[in-house]
Image (tube, rainbow, N blue to C red):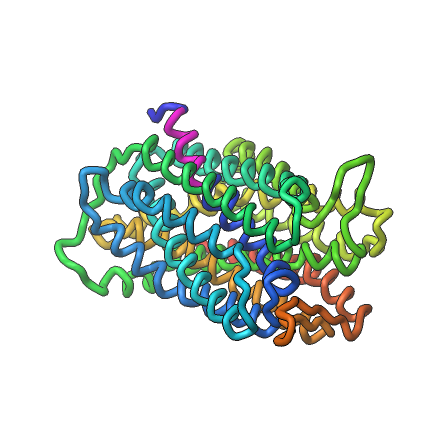
Amino acid sequence: MAKLSEKIGYALGDAAAGGITWKVMSIAFPLFFTNIFGLTVADTATLMLVARLFDVVTDPLMGSLADRTQSRWGTYRPWLLFGAIPLGVVFALLLFTPDFGPVGKRIYAYSLYLLMMAVYTAVNVPYGSLLGVMTSDDNEKNEFSSYRMVGAYAMGFITLLSFPYLQKMVGGSSQHQYAVLGVILGGIAALGTLACGLLTKERIKPVRAEKFSFKPFADLFRNKPWIYLTLIGICTNFFNGFRYAVAGYLLEYCLHGDVTVSGLIINYTVFMTFGEVTCMIFGGLSPRFTRWVGSKKKAFSWAAIICAVTSIAFFFIPMNPKYIWLMVAAVILTSVGIGLYSPLLWSMYADVADYATEQNGTSSTGLIFSSGTMAQKFGSAISGALVAMLLGFAGFISGTDPATGQTVVTITNEASVQQMVWSLFSLFPAAIALLIVLLLRLYPIKK
């Protein structure tokens, strides 16, 4: 039976990766790159697509490499211990805006983003795989997964809520603010990752293949539960990716900037914070909800239905700042569903890893869990790129003035941009949630 300190340690891993680095990359980066860093919409779309699709290849390779790691610290923990500092440093550099022209900025952004994705993969794939070797008890796996989600959402809540106030405290230009916040948040992410590596234990020794082979990769595509769960994972990140990537534009162009209510500054990070705290609460309740409905599959389906219904409801809210609390209520209700299904996804990957071991005779835990981060990045890549491209199609233009080096944003059709933003936050995610329900009906594991 794992100690509470180990569960908290495991939670710190996703607090660092999911609650800080990935949350900022998903929510702040699209707006940061177009409105502050100075990339064009086309460059931003291509950057997010190319860099994260690159990870679709590197994630499975990293999973296979992690499975074969043997060290005094274990199989997966050394990647956390030695990857913590690079993760924080590269993240900080990515939020720095160099004094370059359009071409220099493009090279800097692409290089740092690719490096960030590589470092994130080297840390997060082994982190996810830890769940498969810390315990063999299915209920305890659910608990670890629940702690993980609570850690991610709790830190996401802190990060997003404090963001505008930290910006105000730092002062100066927006570029200076993001650079300083990059150092602060990168440092915290490094410490959380290191703590996770130190506090967790590997109790189950993976059944290793004798030598490297491409057979585990081929086996994946004969693993029906893996195929459906990977598609479900991609869809969950489509769902989150559209909402996160467009949130900044929603506040800026649909509600015409930050909304201040009774002294509370509601910018795009605070707006999404209400969802984070809801996800944190219902992520903790997910194991109990799953036992109540009878299976992970049923619990996931009901959670996805909640997401679909509430997302559709958001579309019909008037596009006016005076309805901000109604919008917040819709975000909270949607996050009930997200909070309930998020821990289930990783627990189900553990089930798929167990199924693969039974079928093939050797462990491919790292490879299986790497598909989870692969789905995360693939879904975020496509959704982030689509947001940028569709906004450009609707009339949003951004870039860097070659003469002055200043960021320039132009809106050629305000009504079209507003309608596109509103739909990307509501109707697009709703369609994805309904697709998740369909895929879950085909998922064969009944646990």
- The residue drawn where x is 52% and y is 75% is 103
- The residue drawn where x is 34% and y is 52% is 122
- The residue drawn where x is 26% and y is 49% is 357
Residue 417 left/right relative to 370: right
Task: Estimate the x, y position of residue 93 in percent, counting from the top left.
Answer: 47, 54
Residue 80 left/right relative to 99: left
Which of the image's four quarters has the C terminus?
Answer: top left
Q: Is residue 8 magenta?
A: yes
With respect to residue 50, does 234 lie above or below? above
- The residue drawn where x is 30% and y is 60% is 61
279 vs 185, nearest the viewer: 185
Residue 231 left/right relative to 421: left
Task: Estimate the x, y position of residue 399 in percent, counting from the top left.
Answer: 64, 71
Q: Is residue 322 magenta?
A: no
To which quarter of the image does residue 196 belong? top left
Task: Estimate the x, y position of residue 155 in percent, counting from the top left.
Answer: 54, 38
Q: How many marks on residues?
A: 0
Residues rendered magenta in the picture: 5-14
> Is residue 366 visible in this depiction of the protein?
yes
Task: Estimate the x, y position of residue 347 in percent, counting from the top left.
Answer: 42, 42
To which quarter of the image does residue 420 belong? bottom right
Which of the image's four quarters has the N terminus?
Answer: top left
